[in-house]
Amino acid sequence: MALREIIILPDKRLREISKPVTEVTTEIRKLADDMFESMYEAPGIGLAAIQIAEPVRLITMDIVRKEGDGKSDPRAFINPEIVGASSEMNVYEEGCLSIPEYYAEVERPKTVRIRYTDLDGNVKEEDADGLFATCIQHEIDHLNGVLFVDHLSKLKRAMVIRKFEKAAKRGIKYV
């Protein structure tokens, strides 16, 4: 495993649409391992491959660790897609490893049904709710070049982007 640098807004690569994974290979499994290590080190509960400058449709998550019961449930999702969503909405305060130290409430569908491939190459479907639903939607957004701030009002989004652009120009690097 290797610790990878997480790219930060305003890095334009965050707006790239990630390419599908065509085969679950040793390289994809190693990338997932690197992503878990980088995600835990940050620390975070979810990471999309594009956040470490790898434009492939791969997500790692561990929401159990966040909930603080001392357990861990690392999960990888290859080519994840939302195949159904509830009309009922939920609001969660979201943050992002690529937009450090900024949090905002985002409204998303309360439950979603996802289809993905696991690291063994098995295609699966499952329902997600609560933090899992929020996190998987957030990470799938990354794969499509969408950031959580894109769900905010135009004014709030512009303020956040401007803040990070100014910091980048001054050479301020968030850790």
Image: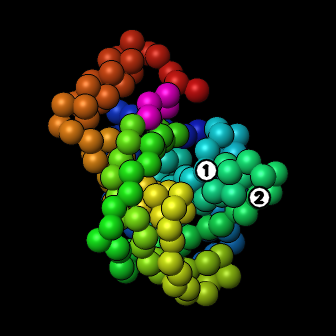
User: Is residue 32 or residue 133 the one in the foreground?
Assistant: 133
Rendered image quadrant of residue 120: bottom right
24 in the magenta segment:
no
Answer whether residue 18 is visible to the viewer in this image.
no
Residue 26 screen position, x and y as percent? 69, 72
Q: Which residues are magenta?
A: 99-103
**Residue 155, placed above or below residue 94:** above
The residue lying at 38 percent from left, 57 percent from top is 90
Other residues around mark 2 within 10 Å, as few (<14) / some (14–19) / many (≥20): few
**Mark 1 is on which residue type?**
Ile
**Which residue corresponds to mark 2?**
72
Q: How many marks?
A: 2
User: What separation in Å lies between label 2 and label 1 (alpha carbons)?
Assistant: 11 Å
The residue lying at 21 percent from left, 39 percent from top is 153
The residue lying at 26 percent from left, 25 percent from top is 159
Residue 169 screen position, x and y as percent? 35, 17
Which residue sits furthest left?
154
Answer whether residue 122 is visible to the viewer in this image.
yes
State the quadrant of the C terminus.
top right
Residue 172 screen position, x and y as percent? 46, 16
101 in the magenta segment:
yes
Q: Secondary structure at mark 2?
A: loop
**Residue 47, placed above or below residue 21:** above
Residue 45 tag number: 1
Residue 25 screen position, x and y as percent? 64, 75
- Which of the two labelled residues, at mark 2 and mark 1, occupies the earlier sequence position? 1
